[in-house]
Amino acid sequence: MKFKFVFILFILTLLLLLLIFIFLPLLLLGPSFSLSYWLANWPLLLIWVLVFLAFIIFYFTNRRLFLLLEKEDWPALVHYLEYEVFKKGKYSSRLVRLLATSYLVLSDTDGVVNLENKTAIAKPALLDTNVLIFGAARILGKDFSGAARFFEARKYTAKPKLKEWVSWFLGFSFLLDYRLQGAADEFSFLARESKNAVVTALSSYFLSETLAHVLPEKETELQQISSVGRNRARSVLPKTENWKREINKISSEIHAAVISKYIDETGRWLYG
């Protein structure tokens, strides 16, 4: 949906609310009572004016950004965002996240790392907010040891809703870096304890289909833990439809796109 259309639709909605506020009392109460009604409820009109002005200012302030997003002109969008973030110093969560995502669309992992370094100086808290994007960029850039260090450093500082994903990507980074025992430890814990059914299923899948084969001395143990995790995941998502619905919730996230192949394989393994 085009941003301009959304803008016009919202403006028309606000104008409709204004007309209702003005004319409905007139129709229901008559001219004499409607005037007293408007005087008594003037704060509502003030709130409407503030919302209207805020939306107008927000739209026209970000009009160029919306236009570039509509066109999907990623090089131009990166140029615009670099100016806003680096030159103007607007290190907001929204702009930093959008710039990092735009770099990844262009497969510019070096750009993400550069953004990460500058954000760490200007506003380090944003690294925890966007930990999955910055970490995923290291994985895409095949800096697996760097990804492991990055996730390990933020395993306990990430926001609560991201912590289990950070732990999973730490295990995934260990696996890609051939630190197999570290991967087994992370995935084993998540398979048994994670409250996120998708994280539980992914951890169980890698324990069964990868780590149990490359760590033959622990095959029985890892398969048992994987079975526990698989049952836990299926108790929450008993049918394929439940799994697909849960995956759809995260399908637009960069970290999900990075591992989309493994998400599909896990779904087949989970219900096969």
Image: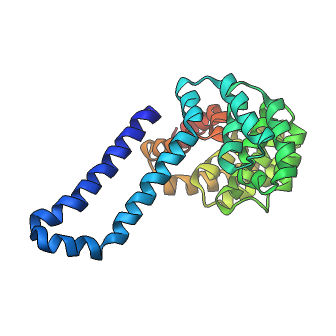
Query: Residue at coordinates 72% horizontally, 39% vertically from top-left?
Result: 84
At x 63%, y 31%, the residue is 261
User: Image check: 266 left or right of 40?
Assistant: right
Residue in view at x 39 percent, y 65 percent: 46
* Viewer-side residue, 187 vs 261: 261
Examine the rendering and report whether any part of residue 181 can be seen.
Answer: no
Q: Is residue 34 left or right of residue 210?
A: left
For the N terminus, give its image quadrant. top left
Q: Between residue 65 and residue 126, name the one nearer to us.
A: 65
Across the whole image, how many numbered discs are drawn on residues? Answer: 0
Q: Where is residue 27 shown, x and y percent of the image?
A: 10, 63
| Residue at the image position 71 percent from the left and 43 percent from the top | 96
Can residue 236 be seen from the camera position used here? Answer: yes
**Residue sitting nearer the eye, 234 or 244:** 244
Residue 160 position in % (x across, y down): 67, 63
The one of 169 and 134 positioned closer to us in this rendering: 134
Residue 257 horizontal/vertical position (percent): 63, 34
| x, y percent for residue 178 | 88, 38
Quarter of the image where one finds residue 136: top right
Q: Is residue 95 left or right of residue 59?
A: right
In the figure, is residue 113 to the left or right of 269?
Answer: right
